[in-house]
Amino acid sequence: MTLSHAGVRGVFLVGRTGKATRSLTVRTGHGVLIPRAGPTTGATAVADVVGSLVSMARIRSVLACVFLLLLLTSCSGGSGEGDAIAVPNPNGQIIKVRVGQEFAYDHIFLRNGGQEPITLRAAELLPDSHLGGRIDTLRIVVAPLNLAPNNRDSTGGGIYTSFPPTTAEGGGPCIVQRIEPLDGYVLAPGADTRIIFLMKAVKTGPFRVAQNRVTYIESGDERFQLLPNEFKGQVTDGPTDVERMDGEKACASLGNLL
């Protein structure tokens, strides 16, 4: 009688006594294992076959786990802390904002100080992206800087009650800050940009930002940097010091006021 299953082949020779002589061969991808041979009952032989199958399943499971661990290790090997973004001086912003008020936090400057272009992927305010549950982030965008004189698409940084930030500086024409999606934005070597957080106050109490975490791709590898920042304030039920600037009021007809 021959019994085979998934790489296991057992041959049982039955004599006149009614007892079976077992010849059991277990084949794996790493060689051939031959257990002891000799008189045995059919039930014992089947139990041995089942035991061998269970052992092989365990070996396959262990090998699969090892392979998956090696795969994950190789995939994460390119990530780590980078240094392409020039470390800025900490910004200092202290505000008081009313519950329910929306505003644009436009005071995070980035400069690619490296030799290769970097592709931005994400930005986060630390130590808590929700600022202690006091502030919700509605949108994060990039504000490319245009340093050409008399440009109409690059405002100064600050706290705005318009989005995109819109102002008429010195009584001149209205300037609307150009914005781009953050994820995928390419920052060339030596180029500057800002990151704008569109935010909404949702709960009374103090909040504070100590760092920015910026994630980007450089030469095919994912990198991150922790950049100094100083942004804090108070969410209240009463008055606010985030008032509309005169330049924003002058451009109200453009429909960008929050």
Image (spheres, helix red, strand yellow):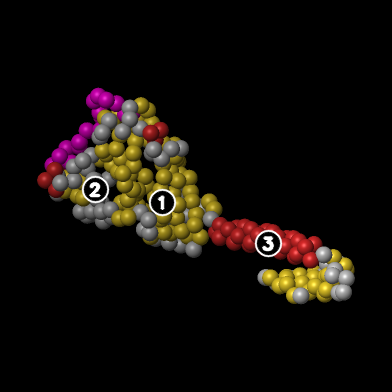
**Image quarter (top left, top right, bottom left or bottom right) of the C terminus:** top left
Cα separation, mark 1 vs mark 2, equals 19 Å
Number of the front mark, 1 or 2: 1
Kindly identify the amino acid type of the residue bearing the numbered disc 1.
Answer: Ala
- 82 to 136, vertically: above or below: below
| Residue of label 1 | 122
**Image position of 165 (left or right of 230):** left
Find the magenta span and give its range. 234-250
| Residue of label 3 | 57
Residue 76 in the image, given as x and y percentages of width and height? 56, 57
Kindly identify the amino acid type of the residue bearing the numbered disc 3.
Answer: Ala
**Image position of 90 (left or right of 238):** right
Q: How many discs mark residues in the rendered view?
A: 3
Residue 229 in the image, given as x and y percentages of width and height? 42, 39
Cα separation, mark 1 vs mark 3, equals 43 Å
Residue 19 in the image, given as x and y percentages of width and height? 85, 68
